[in-house]
Amino acid sequence: MDKKTLIDGLNHDLAGELQAIVMYIHYAAAATGVERLELAEFFEREIQDELRHALFLANKITALGGTPTDEPLPVPKAKNNQEMIKNVLDAEVRTIAAYSERVKQAEEIGDLGLSNDLQDIISDETRHKEEAEKLLRS
Ligand SMILES: [Fe+2]
Ligand SMILES: [Fe+2]
């Protein structure tokens, strides 16, 4: 594991955060029906966390000598509210797995500060995942 591998990994994570921001904005506007307002509020609330994560990653990538990506991963299409929440859940699960891998890589190169910051982000993503699971349960 070298620094370049870590930077590439963090850029992958950043593309995921940019995707999450676009996805939450799009889904908040596109939610329909009686639960529209609640769902829009739920999506809008999470944007703040994802924005913070994206800013952190972009700054860290620069600090490590890399160039932060400006390209989000593609946002999955959703035909209805249920599909939106499912897509959100899938994205959060993938994100948590990616950050868990990144924590290991950060520790391998001895950047314990990064490891600690990434674990805070994992806590946020875990909360997002659990909220999406609860929405799907109702
Ligand atoms: Fe995030
Ligand atoms: Fe999230």
Image (tube, helix red, strand yellow):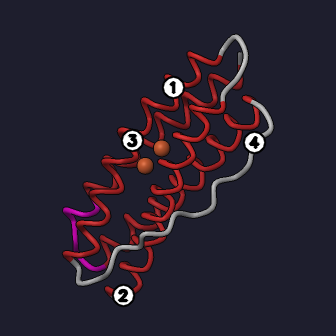
Q: Kindly identify which numbered label has been placed on residue 4.
A: 2
Going from the N terminus, do you reach mark 4 or mark 2 first?
2
- Label 2, secondary structure: give it: helix
- Residue located beneath label 3 in the image: 123
Going from the N terminus, do you reach mark 1 or mark 3 first?
1
Amino acid type for the residue under numbered disc 3: Ser
- From mark 4 to mark 3, how far is it between C-alphas? 26 Å
Of the pair 127 and 57, the residue shown nearer to us: 57
Going from the N terminus, do you reach mark 1 or mark 2 first?
2
Going from the N terminus, do you reach mark 1 or mark 4 first?
1
Q: Kindly identify which numbered label has been placed on residue 42.
A: 1
Amino acid type for the residue under numbered disc 1: Phe
The N terminus sits in image quarter = bottom left
4 vs 3, front mark: 4
State which quadrant residue 87 falls in: top right
**Would you call the spot at circle 3 few (<14 residues within 10 Å), some (14-19), or many (20 or more)?**
few
Residue at 35 percent across and 56 percent down: it is 54
- Residue located beneath label 4 in the image: 78
4 vs 2, front mark: 4
- Which region shows up in magenta? 109-115
- From mark 3 to mark 2, how far is it between C-alphas? 26 Å
Of the pair 25 and 53, the residue shown nearer to us: 25
- From mark 4 to mark 2, how far is it between C-alphas? 35 Å
Magenta-drawn stretch contains 110 = yes
Amino acid type for the residue under numbered disc 4: Ala
- Label 1, secondary structure: give it: helix
Q: Are marks 4 and 3 in contact (CB under 8 Å)?
A: no
Residue 132, relative to residue 10: is it above or below? above
- Label 3, secondary structure: give it: helix
Q: Are marks 3 and 2 in contact (CB under 8 Å)?
A: no
3 vs 2, front mark: 2
1 vs 3, front mark: 1
